[in-house]
Structures are given as C-alpha cells and as structure tokens.
Amino acid sequence: MDLSIIIVNYNTVNLLCQCLTSIYSSPCRYNFEVIVIDNASSDSSCEMVKKDFPQVKLIENKKNIGFARANNQGFGTSQGKYILLLNPDTVILKNALEKLLEFMETHTEAGAVGAKLLYPDGTVQLSCRRFYTPLAILMRRTFLGKMFPNSISLKDHLMSDWDHNEIREVDWMLAACLIVPRHVLDKVGCLDEQYTMYFEDVDICYRIKKAGYKVYYYPEAMVTHYHQRESAQRFSKKTIWHIQSAIRFFNKFGWRS
C-alpha cells in the first residue's frame, strides 16, 4: 500500500461526503486506502460512509476521544508507506494526491509535506507557519491581534510576506492536509494525545525537524479547505484550549523553542 488517508470525523456528514467523493474522483496512479475514524457523531456520518463508500475502513468510537488519539487509532490500523492526515472539511483538487506522493518519492529528506490550501472562493489560506513565539500567541488569540493587525510578530508567524506560489521549507504546516512517511512516524512517534485540542500539528512538525528531516510547503498540490477558526472568532472554551495547548508546547520544548 502506497498511501493511507486518515480522516477524523465528528458530525460533519455533508463535508465528509464531499471530501470522500473528491478523493475517489482524483486521478492517482498509486494504491491508497481511506480510514475514517468517527468520534461518536450524532448525525448520519457513519451510515453515509457505510452506504456510499463501502470501500472505506470505518472505525466507530463510542465517545469523542479527541483529534490526536483518533488519528493515532488510524496510524495503528494503516498499511501505507505514507500517511496523509486529512480533515473532513477538505476537497482534493485535480491530482493533488498523486503530486504529494511524487514529491515524497523524490525528496527523501522530507519528513512532512503540506498541500496548498485554498478557501472555497479560491483565495490562498495561510497554511504554513513559523513556530510560535509567546507574543505571536497573544496576537493570534487575544484582542491584541485586532488592535495591531500589522504586527511584525504576527506577519512573521503567518508568513504573510510572500505569495505562497513556490515550494519552500517551513517550520510547520496545518494538519488539514499533511503527508508523513511511515518510517518518520516510527522514529519521532505519533501525535501527542496530551493536547486538549490544537497544537498537535505544531508539535509533530517540531519533532520531525528536531529529528533532522525537513518540512515542506508544496503548492503544486492544491486542496480546498472549508476552514473555520472557531477559537479566534470569539473568546470561548476553544480559545482557552488553544492557549492551554500553547502552554503545554512551550513547557514541553522550552520557551525559547
């Protein structure tokens, strides 16, 4: 098996259906499997998968065990040489899967590669980042970001100073569409399940880079992402989770990381 696509789902039946349809419609000469881990959805997600996509390996959890633990479930049952973390709110465009695999096959130094993410209107989503600083956290997750939208710290973190049309080595990528070789996961470990929510992608990219591999942004592979920054739209429980995860990350790797 060349590729295992792992999708963690929770009550997103329509988006999940759209995502799976795009996967099986995308030209790809490599062998792949799709694993959907459902975190106890109360909608008809599982019924839809069984009815419309019987070729999908479906894991039905009896409770919501979180993003990291559910992905790790998928790792444990996967067979692919490469693992693709994919959000259910994505749509694979053209031959993005094939392009990602071709890139991985020709770049053995790559420990992780992320696709170019687009909003539904076709505009670029800033999906590759520099590692957080405490100031960048404050700018992203508090009212300070709205007070100082042109903050150098914020622009540096978001890498908003270029057009995102070229291949570039980066610090980390959003895990909405992130491919990692199995041997790299075997070396650095799976996602850290101690995060309540958020920062799992920052954490694993940091470990991948510490192990001597490179993390790449690859714009030739394009994916639409129906992204909603729930923790940033208003102060809520998810905002608190994001800040808690940031504190865990800095405590784990050092505040100078």
Image: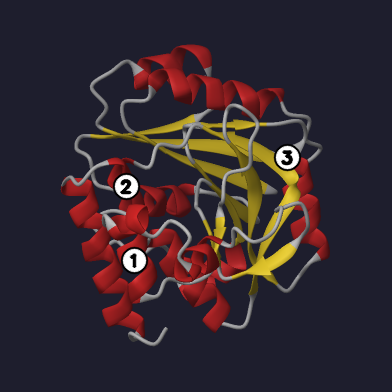
Q: Is residue 257 visible?
A: yes
Q: Which residue is mark 2?
A: 232
Give the percent coordinates (x, y) of residue 189: 44, 70
Quadrant where the C terminus is found in the figure: bottom left
Q: Which residue is mark 3?
A: 96
Q: Which residue is mark 1?
A: 137
| Residue 12 occupies quadrant | top left
- Are there few (<14), some (14-19), or many (20+) residues within 10 Å of tag 2? some
User: Does dot 2 land on a helix, a strand or a loop?
Assistant: helix
Give the mark nearer the N terminus: 3 vs 2.
3
> Which residue is most to the top?
51
Give the mark nearer the N terminus: 1 vs 2.
1
Give the percent coordinates (x, y) of residue 224: 60, 33
User: Does dot 3 land on a helix, a strand or a loop?
Assistant: helix
Give the percent coordinates (x, y) of residue 201: 45, 60
Q: Amino acid at mark 1?
A: Ile
> What is the CA distance from the residue labelled 3 to the residue labelled 1?
31 Å
Q: Say if 7 sits above or below 15 in the image.
A: below
Q: Amino acid at mark 3?
A: Ala
Q: Amino acid at mark 2?
A: Ala
